[in-house]
Amino acid sequence: MSGDFATQVAVVTGGGKGIGRIIALALAREGADVLVVGRDAAALEETCAAIRTLGQRGIAVAADVTQPEQVARLGATIDAECAGQVDVLVTAAGTRDTQQATVDALDLAQFDAVIQGNLNGTLLPVRCVLPFMKARRQGKIVAISGVFGLKGQPGHAAGCSSKWAVEGLVRVLAREMGPYNINVNAVCPGYVEGPRADASLERMAAERGTLAQERRQALEAATALGRLSTADDVANAALFLASARARNITGRDLIVDAGWML
């Protein structure tokens, strides 16, 4: 452990499962105390228990990050448990776009749910921590976005629209928060190994009448490195952008896709 985040306090949304959990644990290994935010209280407690085994404080905040009144719990916890200190925010909570529909066939309720989940799920936690960061005139914000926020993907109007919106928010925040010494960046993963990618591969295979393994091989072949990314790859990118080593990087995207977007 390098201790890059020793004495720091980090907030990770979506930290109970998946990429968010891996990021929360990675921050703890580097010396941070971590507030883990999400809807699944049991999963949050499991992550916090793992953080404590690493010798750091793990604090669970059960909240739906798309609901302002619930996000307010996070602010209250930062005040009560951390004396108003928050050095890092990583927004890893999000809503997956599973419609696979063209724009003219979209279910608008599902479209709105994805927009709310990805855009408001980023915006509201950011708004919550900004007063604390501005008061101390320092902070690092890392939004977990995605490569669909950088390109159009047929059948994914909601996912692309929401991630493009997150990209715009990152750039506005970087300009607005620069005077307060707050860096704001995005990590843009491609396909990431795990249950979500497996489910997506199964869906694509069913639609095309092929096997999931064949779809995986096709995706791997489309990357420069011939492989998919892992949650650890995404966590390493987030830790870099949240660290002092990235002190002069703001308003930027760090793509983690094994060269798929080239």
Image: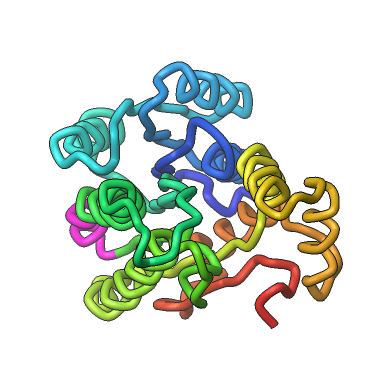
**Towards the viewer: 138 or 24:** 24
**Residue found farthest to the left:** 69
Residue 103 visible: yes
Q: Main secondary structure of the magenta part?
A: helix
Question: Which residue sits at x=50%, y=42%?
Answer: 32
Residue 1 visible: no
- The quarter of the image holding the C terminus is bottom right
Image vertical order of residue 187 relative to residue 195, above or below: below
Answer with left or right where residue 75 lies relative to residue 6: left
How many labels, in total? Answer: 0
Image vertical order of residue 104 relative to residue 108, above or below: below
**Residue found farthest to the top:** 42
Q: Which residues are magenta?
A: 130-137
Residue 4: image x %, image y %?
Answer: 58, 54
Question: Which residue sits at x=40%, y=20%?
Answer: 41
| The quadrant where residue 157 appears | bottom left
Residue 182: image x %, image y %?
Answer: 33, 68
**Towards the viewer: 39 or 237:** 39
Answer with left or right where residue 191 lies relative to residue 109: right
Image vertical order of residue 9 relative to residue 225, above or below: above
| The quadrant where residue 160 appears | bottom left
Question: Is 161 one of the magenta-colored residues?
Answer: no
- The quarter of the image holding the N terminus is top right
Question: Is 133 one of the magenta-colored residues?
Answer: yes
Image vertical order of residue 97 relative to residue 48, above or below: below
